[in-house]
Amino acid sequence: MLKKNPNKQDAFDTIWNALGEFYNRSSYHKAETQLSFIADYTEHVFGKNSFSKSIRRHFDGIVEHIRSKLTNGILEGINSKVQTLKRIAKGFRKIENFKKMVFFYFWYYSA
């Protein structure tokens, strides 16, 4: 049972444990309930805060992670490589040469 007025360390521990349970869920609907609890409990203890606002703003995407187990980490990595190639390719006069450079880089390192 949750305390009516927990101290901040107890509240933090409760939220931390709830987040751990959330990421171990396999049921989409239970994950929704768990994440709603986390956002509500955080607001109850700490008032309006950026953590609970972020949960509410990105609620669907966070819960979708439970269903798909996908992140955008791979896309972020690819984007990072393309941005690096853009910096290297500053002197290219034609966009076609830049496209060839990107293609060659990803073809070479995927083989």
Image: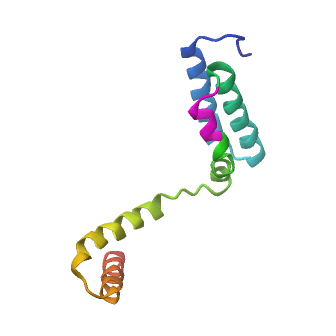
- 79 vs 18: above or below: below
Residue 54 in the image, given as x and y percentages of width and height = 60, 40
Q: x%, y% of residue 65? A: 62, 52
Q: Can you name the residue that lies furthest to the front here?
A: 93
Residue 9 locus on image (x, y percent): 54, 15
Residue 7 position by quadrant: top right
Magenta residues, dominant SS class: helix
Give the side of residue 39 with respect to residue 96, left or right: right
Q: How many marks do you count on the picture?
A: 0
Q: Quadrant of residue 53?
A: top right
Magenta residues span 48-55
| Chosen colour scheme | rainbow
In-front residue for pair 91/31: 91
Choose between 27 and 82: the one closer to the eye.
82
Q: Which quadrant does the N terminus fall into?
A: top right
Residue drawn at x 76%, y 38% as measured from the top left? 33
Residue at point 29%, 72% (across, down): 85
Is 25 placed left or right of 12 in the picture? right
Out of 80 and 109, give the one closest to the viewer.
80
Q: Residue at (71%, 42%) from the top-left corner?
A: 31
Residue 102 painted magenta: no
- The residue under the point 41% across, 66% down is 79
Q: Position of residue 111 (x, y in %)?
A: 34, 79
Classify 64 as above or below 7: below
Outermost residue toward the left?
91
